[in-house]
Amino acid sequence: ESTALVPAPVDIANKLRYLFGRNGDYTVADAYQGTSWSVREKLIDSFNKTHEHWKKEDPKFIYYLSAEFLMGRSLINTVYNLGLEGEYAEALNQLGYEMEKVADAERDAALGNGGLGRLAACFLDSMATLDLPGWGYGIRYKYGMFKQALRNGYQVELPDIWLTKGNPWELRRDDVKFEVGFGGRVERRKQGSKEITVWTPSEKVIAQAYDNPIPGFNTPTTSNLRLWDAVPLTEFDLSAFNAGDYDRAMLERERAEGISAVLYPNDSTPEGKELRLKQQYFFVCASLQDVLSRFKAVHGNNFDLLPEKACFQLNDTHPTIAVAELMRLLLDVEGLDWDKVWTITTKCLNYTNHTVMPEALEKWPVKVMAKMLPRHMEIIEVINEGWTKWLGGHLKDLAPEERAKRIAAMSIIHENPWNKEEMLVNMAYLAVVGSSAVNGVAAIHSNIVKDEILNDFYQIFPSKFQNKTNGVTPRRWLAWCNPELASLITDTLGTSEWINDTEKLAGLRAYASDKAFQAKWAAVKKAKKAKLAELIKKVHGDEVNPNALFDIQIKRIHEYKRQYLNVLSIIWRYKQLKKMSPEERKKAVARVCVIGGKAASAYDMAKRIIRLVTAVGDVINKDPETKDYLRLYFLPDYNVSLAETIIPAAELSQHISTAGTEASGTSNMKFQMNGCLIIGTWDGANIEIAEETGIDNVFVFGVRAEEINQLRKERKNLKTDPRWDELMRDIEGGMFGDKDYFKPLVDSVNNMKVGNDWFLLANDFASYLKAQEDVDACYKDQSEWLRRSIMYTAGSGKFSSDRTIREYAEDIWHVTPSRPTA
Ligand SMILES: CCc1ccc([C@H](C)CC(=O)N[C@@H]2O[C@H](CO)[C@@H](O)[C@H](O)[C@H]2O)cc1
């Protein structure tokens, strides 16, 4: 191949000279550009080879439809996955640069909010590494997840202008464009003997494809993430301009570009904005047209074959309009009949649920859907008629009123419980009825999905419901972000095969109590802690005690994730330290507590929680009596690359959601892989992590999911812990200032007249403090702590996204690996 022959240092210099016209005295940002555009060519070679091979083999493909892909940075991951780290590290050294510094010049591709988006990114890495013919499909947001800054301790949101310097990791596909329509009307027309349905949209935009090659690790396979950018049908409306109507000349451009302009920053409550539905339909319509056109190019109109050649995973309800869109394309465009089309559609689609939060389950008003997508609303009505009629037959043995109740409860179109006039389209119900498989993302969550939120459907077709416990890629989240620990593991196990066969990590169990190995293990953690200490110094200007226990909670700010409970325990710890004599304090376990995470821009209570964290930090970090024993820092702008710095340095991580609320969690798995101990509730994947690591090694506390409903009923009569009451008084009394701003926070958990402590912080308070005391006691015995730390990594094999993807491929997608010859 062309570029492979040019030595990297020369190639980097050439890129800088000819791509950027730079002739010497390069900046680190230049070095990043030069290196990326050099690596890009190796990536494209692998991409082309892979797709030539798949073109020849024509294997069955999996298409992962997701409104979010939280990719983070690509340089390090691409260089390491392609096995080029030696060559490029050397090349950069020759040019006087360190790979790590150059990598820091890259902006995160933050095209996602949190767990769901990052999971999609980890899945792409595993699909490529497992040689599975598969693509991701999504939206090329011009502005990704907002940048978070702190102003006087309050969150402020700044636009994420990530594309200004171009993007070396994407290829614009000028030959891949599709029209996407909105609004307009639907009419029946005679065509010969047949009656056809014609939808005439009132608005059209073009979906422009951008390919993002996804390199597998230790394989020649490089797959693809195709993202769609919205552009106007006509570049510029000159006639409007000539008519002096400049605004109208630009109007169509703005309206089109507005569709893929910005990511909605909510990760739990839908805005319910029309633009959100437009975004969802935009990328689904373009993706399905793209897949059908490639299918037809090989198989013509033999659509019965489609389910053998293509299947789709709906990443939560966000792409669920795909049920109606695939129906429309096969009915109206390809002219197939309803039953055949329904069979093909349901065979092709699968749905993953990622949350049980009622407010997160999307329901679109029928009037909004009917106005924006009139043909789809028709199709959804016909689907629902067929479905409720079929239900009527299936439930014929039930008493009429019981049958009617069950059918109404499972109707895809139903009344808005809060406003009876309004009818809603329940996207989760449409996804379940329109899919072959429905899965949750951790064992407990999949049980809650089938036993509670979708129980009616589970009773009708139990075989549809599965569990697929989440996973994370061990490449980015251990091997590349913690190379020091990775090489210690490789040296100890005598192989690096664990990087794509993480079950091999279990071999570390034999060394868990080995003093020499523990010393090496501790040295790595110490070095990574020093890196995080540097970052805290840079952001907050403070030196932190490197021997303190680094206690981390990083995730989106949400009441159910209970960052508030964490802060309460820190305030209590602070007050205990204040009461101690200097001698006693010396015996205390010093802690550096770090909290990070973004609050959805419209989520007021979450923003108050962030302010409480910064206010408490301001007080305790400056307190001369305690500051050597306790610190609290809010690290702003938590994102993928910040996580890659924090997680290797962590010793204790917190996953303290109210049991039954966190579907899985994935940061818990990343911490586990990096030998970080967990304090957590019996929730999500914490449970399976405890099973793999050994329950005694995890600091578990709190009420169980099955107790929640009863405890909520009794919450108003709960006798709260006197320590809790004291803390409530402190905050309300202004101990951390801003008492009026914090009052709603106190009321939400402590004043049953206005709040209801829905997430049961008061119920879990005492057992949480107890668990934290157990943590201190354990930390004092470093050999026990290190034994556990090693057992965490040793028990993390299951939580590789390779295991998760293998299960999806075998149990849902029925796709098999197809590796191009090297
Ligand atoms: C419509 C607004 C919206 C946007 C995103 C979402 C996501 C489903 C929220 C999310 O990211 N859920 C997280 O998904 C992870 C991956 O499966 C899980 O590990 C987390 O537990 C879950 O909260 C819900 C609602």
Image (cartoon, rainbow, N blue to C red):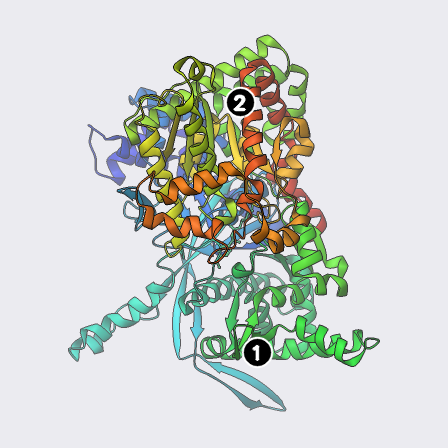
Res 792 → quadrant: top right
**How many numbered marks, from 0 up?**
2
Can residue 59 be seen?
no
Question: Which quarter of the rendered picture does the C terminus lie within?
Answer: top right
Q: Could you tell me residue 343's position as x and y percent?
A: 70, 69
Q: Residues within 10 Å of mark 1 (few under 14, many from 20)?
A: some
Distance CA(mark 1)–CA(mark 2): 66 Å
Q: Is residue 628 left or right of residue 764?
A: left
The reply, left or right, for residue 709 in relation to residue 624 is: right
In the picture of the structure, the residue carrying the numbered disc 2 is: 776
Q: Position of residue 787 (x, y in %)?
A: 61, 18
| Image location (x, y in percent) of residue 385 | 66, 80
Out of 392 and 69, give the one closest to the viewer: 392
Q: Residue at x 38, y 69 (%)?
A: 205
Q: Residue at x 52, y 61 (%)?
A: 359
Which-is-in-front pick, marks 1 and 2?
Answer: 2
Q: Give the quadrant of residue 618.
A: top left
Instruction: Where is residue 161? Give x, y as percent.
Output: 30, 49
Q: Which mark is residue 332?
A: 1
Q: Which amino acid does the dot numbered 1 rest on?
A: Asp
436 vs 175, nearest the viewer: 436
